[in-house]
Image (cartoon, rainbow, N blue to C red):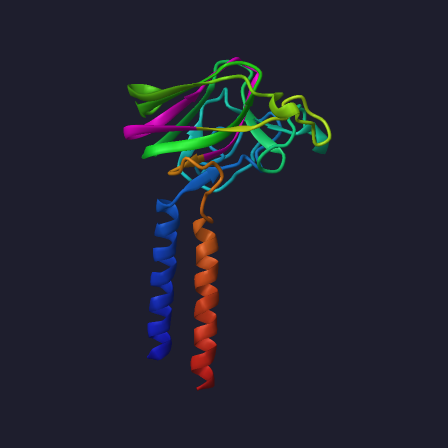
Amino acid sequence: MLQKILKTVSVATILSASSFANAGVITLDFEGVGNTASINDFYNGGTDSQGNSGFDYGVGFGSDALACVDSDVGGSCGFANEPTNDTVMFFLSGSSVLNYGEGFDTGFSFYYSSSAIVSIDVYSGLGLTGDKLGSIDLAANWKDNGCSGDPTGAFCNWDIGSLNFAGTAMSIDFGGAANNVGFDNITFGSTDAGTGVPEPSTFAFFALALFGLVSRKVQKK
C-alpha cells in the first residue's frame, strides 16, 4: 500500500516539475543545430534542415533563420566569444523569424553581435501578423571594447538586447543586414539573457531519484 502511495506521489511530482519547467524561463542557445542548417522545427518537436532535433519548446523558425558553428571547431562562421559554446543564429537573406505558438508576455532578451544596425520587432500573431507590440534598434557592436577572438573571429563582442512589451506575443522578427549579425541565448520570460531553467526531463530525473531514495528507506524499515 505504501509503495503504491509513493508511486502516486512520484508521478505527481514529475508532472508538477514538468509543468513548472514549461512555465518558467527558457533559453534557446542553438547548440546541436547543424552548421548552416535552417533551424526550422529544431525546438518545435521536429528537426532542422539537416535532421537534428532539440527539446520541444513549441518554438519554430522561418526558413531564413540559420545556425552557424564557430570556425574554431570546424564550422563556417567568424564569430568569437560566443555566450554559449559554438553555435549562433544568423541569416543570409530576409530575416530570422521566430514563431512561438503558445505565446509569451512581458519581455525577452538575447545576445547579439553585429556589424550593422539591428532591428527587432515583436508581433501578436504568428508569422509577423497582428499588432506590432514592440520594436527596438540596436547599434553595430561587433568590435567594441577592443575584443579579441577565441582565438579567431571578427564578430567578437556580444551585448545583451532586451525588449519589454504589453500583451501576448507570438512572433519575433530578428532583422538587420543579412550576413552581418548573429544572435545567441534568446531568452523568454526574462530580460537577463541566458537564465533559462532546466528542461522538464531534468526535473523528472531528480524526482525519480528522490523517489528511489525514499523507497529504499521504506524497504529497510
Q: Residue 168, position in %: x, y?
A: 28, 31
Prevalent SS, magenta region = strand
Front residue of 208/195: it is 195
Q: Indicate whether residue 179 is drawn in magenta.
A: yes
The quadrant of the image that shows the N terminus is bottom left
* Residue 2 in sight from this viewpoint: yes
Q: In this view, does 189 lie above or below 159?
A: below
* Residue 49 in sight from this viewpoint: no
Q: In this view, does 100 lie above or below 219?
A: above
Front residue of 14/29: it is 29
- Among all residues in the image, which is located at the extreme front? 145
Front residue of 81/36: it is 81
In the image, taking residue 179 as reference, residue 161 lies left or right, namely left
State which quadrant residue 214 falls in: bottom left
Picture mark count: 0
The quadrant of the image that shows the C terminus is bottom left
Q: In this view, does 24 lie above or below 149?
A: below
State which quadrant residue 102 falls in: top left
Q: Which residue is drawn at 33% across and 25% down?
A: 126
Q: Give the range drawn in magenta.
A: 162-186
Q: Indicate whether residue 218 is drawn in magenta.
A: no
Q: Residue 165, position in %: x, y?
A: 31, 28
Q: In this view, does 98 lie above or below 194?
A: above
Q: Residue 197, position in %: x, y?
A: 45, 47
